[in-house]
């Protein structure tokens, strides 16, 4: 900490591909957790130790540190996808070490039960209006959403969190009315929704082209899917929950998957909109 840490913290917009323009964008796709909401901040610190405990019990000879590194990489590659995919990949890791995995749905339930303990007070804070919604939001997110809506973009909110939960959390944060394209979360039937399906649906049903989509997210999946169709992306590499500085681990991975801009938060939303739309 101290001066060194402060000088290393990046607090502003990093143009990874300077000039990447969303000038023609007609639709914006937002991820929810870690991009708009920090209600579930810390989820990874619930998920990865749970997985490490199970793998350690299989006595494969790998150290806890090695296992955590493998788990973090696996979790990263599926971040933004529905939670069940992380549990399916985890079940494979159990099998690979000679274990007999539980049904991935069981692992998902274990994880959500543990996460709930961590977040229930936050949800109550919002329900009882003990804090303003901004307290559990990535700073500047609301202002950015307002400004994109004012520009006439069709707004879509898409999450890998179960829809029943994320709809309620979006409502509590007051962002639902901005998303005129819809609010979408994970369904039990995996074939009925994914970020890929949503993007394909936008292209096939609204006449918006892939390169007319701008995507905002902190996960691998949403950045990859928007890049695949030729869109422009802003990666949120935030050190949660404060969201004041860039998380270098996330930054490198978001750049690796093709993010055009990296931000620690949206406090510079006016400049970000300038960069995206005036070029
Ligand atoms: Mg996210």
Image (tube, helix red, strand yellow):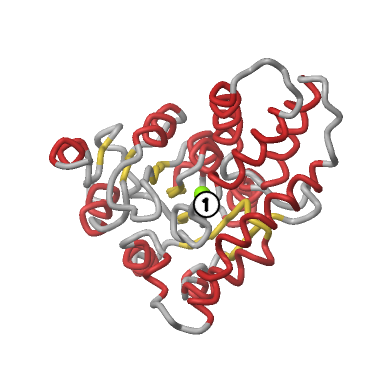
Residue sitting at 59 percent across and 65 percent down?
A: 182
Residue sitting at 42 percent across and 34 percent down?
A: 254
Q: Is residue 124 above or below residue 187?
A: below
Q: Quadrant of the N terminus?
A: top left
Image coords of residue 22 (percent x, y) = 35, 47
Q: Quadrant of residue 7?
A: top left
Image position of 143 (left or right of 122): left
Residue sitting at 52 percent across and 72 percent down?
A: 176
Q: Is residue 1 above or below residue 165?
A: above
Q: Quadrant of residue 235?
A: top left
Image coords of residue 238 (percent x, y) = 36, 46
Residue sitting at 55 percent across and 50 percent down?
A: 43
Q: Quadrant of the C terminus?
A: top left
Image coords of residue 16 (percent x, y) = 29, 33
Q: Nearer the viewer, residue 205 or 71?
A: 71
Q: Nearer the viewer, residue 201 or 197?
A: 197
Q: Nearer the viewer, residue 128 or 55?
A: 55
Residue 234 visible in the current orientation: no
Q: Nearer the viewer, residue 15 or 239?
A: 239
Q: Is residue 215 above or below residue 172?
A: above
Report the number of discs. Answer: 1
Q: Residue furthest top?
A: 61
Residue 88 visible in the current orientation: yes
Image position of 26 (left or right of 95): left
Image coords of residue 68 (percent x, y) = 57, 29
Q: Quadrant of residue 225?
A: top right
Tell me the residue that label 1 is attached to.
208
Q: Residues within 10 Å of mark 1 (few under 14, many from 20)?
A: some
């Amino acid at each position: 900490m101290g001066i060194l840490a402060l000088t290393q913290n990046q607090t502003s917009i990093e143009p990874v591909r300077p000039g990447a323009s969303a000038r023609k964008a007609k639709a914006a796709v937002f991820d929810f957790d870690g991009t708009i909401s920090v209600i579930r901040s810390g989820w990874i610190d619930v998920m990865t130790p749970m997985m490490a405990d199970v793998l350690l019990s299989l006595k494969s000879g790998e150290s806890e540190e090695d296992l955590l590194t493998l788990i973090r990489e696996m979790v990263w590659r599926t971040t933004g996808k529905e939670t069940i995919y992380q549990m399916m990949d985890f079940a494979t890791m159990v099998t690979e070490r000679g274990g007999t995995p539980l049904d991935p749905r069981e692992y998902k339930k274990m994880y959500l039960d543990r996460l709930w303990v961590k977040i229930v007070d936050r949800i109550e804070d919002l329900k009882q209006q003990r804090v303003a919604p901004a307290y559990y939001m990535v700073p500047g997110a609301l202002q950015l959403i307002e400004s994109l809506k004012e520009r006439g973009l069709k707004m879509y909110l898409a999450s890998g969190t179960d829809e029943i939960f994320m709809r309620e959390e979006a409502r509590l944060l007051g962002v639902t009315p901005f998303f005129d394209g819809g609010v979408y979360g994970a369904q039990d039937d995996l074939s009925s929704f994914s970020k890929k399906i949503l993007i394909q649906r936008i292209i096939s049903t609204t006449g918006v082209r892939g390169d007319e989509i701008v995507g905002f997210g902190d996960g691998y999946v949403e950045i990859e899917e928007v890049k695949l169709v030729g869109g422009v992306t802003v990666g949120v590499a935030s050190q949660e929950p404060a969201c004041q500085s860039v998380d270098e681990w996330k930054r490198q991975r978001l750049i690796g998957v093709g993010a055009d801009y990296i931000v620690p938060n949206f406090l510079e939303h006016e400049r970000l909109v300038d960069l995206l739309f005036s070029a």
